[in-house]
């Protein structure tokens, strides 16, 4: 099969390399958009934009699925990405064998846009969980509880999450704040989730407050900050830091 | 050693039974409060009240540790409870061998009140996580994503938590809403966490909003509701239900 | 001058009548959209939509100003409306003499969309003020303070607002809940304000929470409710009513 | 009558001067606390503390009313203060003629603590109104609407309040930020209001969020800031300032 691939960045390059082992991968240009083409959008995007794109492409006989990936660059290297696909059953069936070359778990989550939607929604859950866990850990610290102990208890019990197990210990206990995922991108995801809520005329107060707190943190920390650095803003809002006192 | 035990309920009875195998367990009455006695408070309580109690008891030469437990009735039966202890190092050393009889993991978390504090704080993290996860799953459902799929994707990725893995699938996918932990008790825990924040002059907006949403849900659902039923209130706030449409 | 007028409702009919005294007012149809025409949009709308409309009309040589009105039907009858105009200085100059016939205070607030923007923003301030005032009055009531007294003190002091002076006394003290302005319209205004914030990448947590609380109230009260009935929802969230106890 | 007066500050000194024209005003000391004495607490305080104080004094046969004042130092100078009194009808009858010497409007608002309660509640309404009005004015400004115009429109319409009429124009339009009322005191009032809500097991999400935003602003601005300077924090949360652009 002939595949056109756009976007050879940190994620895209290894993905394209895997594809090139089994298919002819070419540089994309507009003549390729002939009827019957399947457009696979593996970026992170706005599901409402995806729907509009799909609708515009459909007028030209071009099919569209959104297929955002998770698993970080290591997952792209090892072809172990998880890929969430939005689109018709028929288009998913066409996309699946191609996506299996670059990813391990390929899930058909729903209609066009559903891949983008579920990605920003789960990232928003993570964002809110990072924030509430940081608030409560700060209260624990100020009560005189050692942060390492507070995290151990949290992870042994009901408050356990990806945030408490994998994201916060390195920062709050070890004081290491690597740049893993830019806050500006996380804020974008949560803002897309908020716009899904708006579109649905939904009442989601906790998501809304999370979004506005992340946006304020972004304005304060700037475009180069890592997303977990919001925990620093939480400490500042309380006139303190995460340093051991 | 002679032990006095108060509170033979669903949790207390098996705990007392384990203790009675190794110690003389007696019915408590006030003459027992002689100097040197160690008071172990295994209930869920307000850490500020614990501090006041400890201070009052100290005047009589009585020592105090707070030692709330987690692990549910099955943990009490099998003596596999996790117990978080607040108190001095010396008093913890006296309490530990006794607590090892009824629990598996005994953690010294900090000064008097710290056991009670960390318990309500981790329960508050759980409460907020239940709420934000429900909000985002409802948006996913209304976008046309199957709830089972949405939960599977969440649990395979960044938004994973105790709430998404263990608490929500049974209710939202299987439609089973058992009474595990009363909302009135969970609301009490979150309100105690909010009062810790108040005491510390803290700014914790997400915890605050979570508390007021839970309290509103409690006023709406009544004293007999299970804590996960807040998800029903979230659906009502959006003019819908969790039923498959 | 020849004027085309669309929308002869409760507001539009008296407005058109005033215009007809000085100008030829005709039924509108598409041939009227010739270059040089000035389109005056006196409805309540989304400022971003206004900008798109203005842009589309500009391509045809048609000018556009948004000119939403306040002052209720009585103001339309008496030609005492306040009109907030968004558009270029030149277009405002053309619109002003026409608008003076139907309104008393004509304000040029800014570029295209600014009229619509300032209208939904001030309505959002009002919405939030109604909500916070109701919350605090409910606390006063539950403390044992007579509502009439609580409102009198509020209006004699720092917490005074249009909400406390004109909107709440009739409902909370006299128990009269007339339908003045539908909640479904007020919710729409606040949601437009929220979308302005989204568009600007703004952090406005209080506006966001207000919007989500109003939307939840709308889902609960239904499309026929008056906007001040949100105060009833606040009482329900607290397991009580506004009735004297 | 013999009156004992404590607290000769900016407010107290002119108040005591007015009283001294008609009564013997003495320096207070504990022997004055004889049965039958009426204790008038004109400070701003926590209504729950007032109730405890009243209860303690009652045991000694001493009566208590809380009577916080509003009207600023100019009101104290001119004896035009508004005074909100909490206490029994009988005790109010005794306090009223004395309070009439220092104030103009003396209102019996309810039982002991009601004076303190209504004061912090109305101040909280003001705080929330300052915040939401600032948020919406910032959105207006960023939309291209002149702040002076935005305030004029707000004050001509539905969003009008003490905040928009008297507090914000001087700061946002004229750029003058005088120290009128310390943020640390306003934050204290809102925190007392939040504790009333807590005491009542109330759900007041907008008050709660307002409190946590004010507390964060206080931690950021410090103890010397004026309460309206929270508007500066709102601008910072949006990566901008109130300066004309």
Image (spheres, coloured by chain):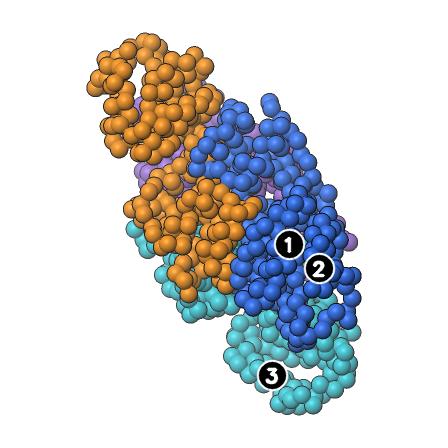
Chain colours: A purple, B cyan, C orange, D blue
Q: Which residue is mark 2?
A: D23
For the residues marked 1 and 2, what is the alpha-carbon distance in whole angstroms?
Answer: 10 Å
Q: Which mark is residue B6?
A: 3
Disc 2, SS:
loop
For the residue pair D47 and B142, the one nearer the viewer reads as D47
Position of B4 relative to A241 (above/below): below
Chain hosting mark 3: B
Residue C94 in view in this figure: yes
10 Å crowding of disc 3: few (<14), some (14-19), many (20+) = some
Name the spot of residue A189 as percent of width and height, x first.
51, 38
Secondary element under disc 1, as helix, strand or loop, is helix
Looking at the image, residue C8 sits to the left or right of residue C166; the answer is left
Q: Tell me where residue A60 appears, x and y as whole percent.
A: 31, 23
**Which class describes the residues within 10 Å of circle 1: few (<14), some (14-19), or many (20+)?**
some
The answer to whether residue A116 is seen in the rendering is no
Chain to which the residue tagged by mark 2 belongs: D
Point out the frontmost of discs 1 and 3. 1
Residue in the picture at 72% in, 64% down: D2
Do the dots labelled 1 and 3 sit on one chain? no
Residue B145, given in percent of the width and then of the height, sits at 37, 46
Image position of A62 (left or right of A189):
left
CB within 8 Å, label 1 to label 3: no
Look at the picture and state if D238 lies above or below B90. above
Image-based side of A91 in relation to C161, left or right: left
Q: Of C209 and A4, which appears nearest the observer?
A: C209
Residue matched to label 1:
D101
Give me the residue at 51% from left, 68% from top: B185
Question: Could you tell me which secondary element the residue under label 3 belongs to?
Answer: loop
């Amino acid at each position: 099969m002939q595949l056109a691939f756009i976007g050879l960045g940190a994620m895209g390059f290894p993905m394209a390399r895997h594809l090139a082992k089994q298919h002819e991968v070419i540089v994309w240009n507009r003549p390729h958009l002939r009827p019957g083409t399947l457009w696979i959008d593996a970026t992170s995007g706005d599901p409402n934009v995806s729907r509009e794109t799909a609708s515009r492409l459909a007028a030209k006989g071009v099919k569209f699925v959104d297929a955002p990936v998770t698993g970080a660059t290591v997952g792209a290297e090892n072809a172990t990405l998880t890929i969430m696909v939005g689109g018709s059953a028929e288009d998913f069936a066409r996309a699946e064998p191609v996506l299996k070359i670059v990813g391990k778990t390929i899930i058909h989550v729903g209609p066009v846009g559903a891949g983008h939607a579920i990605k920003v929604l789960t990232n928003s859950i993570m964002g809110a969980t990072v924030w509430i866990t940081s608030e409560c850990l700060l209260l624990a610290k100020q009560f005189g509880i050692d942060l390492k102990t507070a995290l151990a208890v949290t992870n042994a019990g009901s408050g356990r999450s990806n945030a408490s197990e994998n994201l916060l210990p390195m920062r709050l206990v070890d004081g290491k704040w690597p740049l893993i995922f830019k806050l500006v991108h996380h804020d974008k995801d949560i803002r897309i989730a908020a716009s899904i809520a708006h579109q649905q005329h939904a009442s989601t107060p906790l998501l809304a407050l999370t979004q506005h707190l992340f946006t304020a943190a972004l304005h304060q920390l700037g475009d180069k900050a890592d997303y977990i650095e919001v925990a620093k803003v939480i400490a500042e809002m309380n006139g303190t830091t995460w340093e051991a006192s």
